[in-house]
Amino acid sequence: MYDYLIVGAGFAGSVLAERLATQLNKKVLILDKRNHIGGNAFDHYNTDGILVHKYGPHIFHTNSREVFDYLSNFTAWRPYEHRVLASVDGQLVPMPINLDTINKLYGLSLTSFEVDDFFKSVAEEVSPVRTSEDVVVSKVGRELYEKFFRNYTRKQWGMDPSELDKSVTSRVPVRTNRDNRYFTDTYQAMPLHGYTAMFEKMLAHPNIHIMLNTDYHDVQDTIAFKEMIFTGPVDEYFDYTYGKLPYRSLEFKHETLPTEKHLEAAVVNFPNEHAYTRITEFKYLTGQQHTKTSIVYEYPQAEGDPYYPVPRPENAEIYNKYKKLADETPNVHFVGRLATYKYYNMDQVVAQALTLYKKILTRNQLFQGNGV
Ligand code: FAD
Ligand code: UDP
């Protein structure tokens, strides 16, 4: 009899397995239908010996000291600040849009103050700001929106930014200074030996059993457990009772090239050309020295593995119905990007899992206090 059956060995499932096993001495079975742990953050050495991220580039960044300290129990870090270029009008320019982007794009030499005035002169008044189009045009106007955001978003999501919640393009700031980092979080680093090595350490405990290549549908009736933690798609758990929740998928095309360096930055975005959205060169992220280099192209797809919840009001409405069902389901906890239908980064999923752990801990303490 297991205390916990955990479905999914990504960040959500692995953090909970580790906490419950090591802090509460619970017996945990964690299973994943894939043939590896780590969920979408899984990395591995390819046949040329280059460390690559199977499901696209994963860059760790957080403002949460608690999350950073927690993960630091399982990995050392390599300081890393992520930088991205966008291919626009035949040039490679910094993304997020900053002072240098504008000067290079238009052949100008504006100061920070002048570029601020420039943004104000082209920005459109939008009230209220609701959609992913509103966010951008209200900051930098229509021309820059069309050069950098409109087509990228249409490719990535299969719909116009005007149909997506503002939270999507709000992830990318606009700057009037020369800061060309993609993120400005307090902690920005990559696990020194990769994500999978970090997950291996998290899950290396005698109370944790791992079962790979196993869909929980196939085994749920044969395993005895007291509680479940579910980190897969919430609509799938409830047999699509309220219909399918849309998830956006990607196809990853990995390539290794016989050259030391291929791109001018870790990632190059292609808003207006090609069927793919971006190319990533992994050696920038990992710092690995190698005579060859490995890259990945991301091709957005409607069908395939569910990678991105699609933030828009109609979907939030469907999700809220599933959430009500989830809240009413005894002894099953839903956590993670797919089970709570939230466009969360890794650190947000870790924080969400730690919060659930604290809830379980408090409940246990209350039970013990009551002599149960
Ligand atoms: P997942 O990692 O998806 O884990 C869920 C697991 O459940 C999966 O392994 C799945 O196989 C398993 N599962 C599902 N259903 C079943 C079932 N029926 N039976 C058994 N197992 C099942 N975040 C960042 O912070 N920085 C980044 O740079 C970044 N880049 C990203 C790039 C891409 C292309 C994508 C798609 C995501 C990126 N993210 C990034 C987000 C990050 O991947 C997620 O926040 C994180 O991996 C979510 O963890 P999770 O445990 O919730 O879900
Ligand atoms: N985006 C864009 N152009 C870019 C980069 C991002 O239009 O060059 C939009 C796009 O809608 C994307 C969203 O901003 O999905 C969030 O970008 P982010 O880089 O955070 O996406 P992720 O890494 O999560 O795929």
Image (cartoon, rainbow, N blue to C red):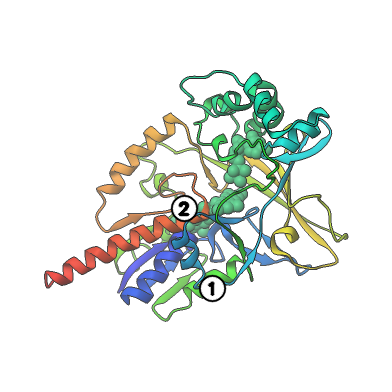
- Residue 264's disc is none
Q: Position of residue 170 (x, y in %)?
A: 54, 36
Q: Residue 114 sits in which quadrant?
A: top right
Which residue: 39% across, 61% down? 354
Picture layout, residue 213 above or below residue 94: below
Q: Position of residue 173 (x, y in %)?
A: 60, 38
- Of labels 1 and 2, earlier in sequence is 1
The amino acid pointed to by label 1 is Glu
* Image quarter of the N terminus: bottom left
Q: Which residue is mark 1?
A: 200
Q: Position of residue 260 (x, y in %)?
A: 85, 61
Ligand 1 has an atom within 8 Å of the beta carbon of the residue at disc 2: yes
Q: Position of residue 16 (x, y in %)?
A: 40, 65
Which residue: 59% across, 18% down? 124
On the question of residue 215 being in view, the answer is: no
Furthest-left residue in view? Answer: 370
On the question of residue 206 being in view, the answer is: yes
Q: Secondary structure at mark 2?
A: helix
Of residues 207 and 29, the one nearer the viewer is 207
Q: Which residue is mark 2?
A: 348
What whole-number distance in Å separates the C-alpha atoms at marks 1 and 2? 20 Å
The amino acid pointed to by label 2 is Gln
Q: Residue 291 sits in which quadrant?
A: bottom right
Badge 2: residue crowd in 10 Å (few <14, some 14–19, many ≥20): many
Picture layout, residue 93 above or below residue 76: above
Q: Secondary structure at mark 1?
A: helix
Picture layout, residue 157 above or below residue 52: above
Which residue: 65% across, 53% down? 56
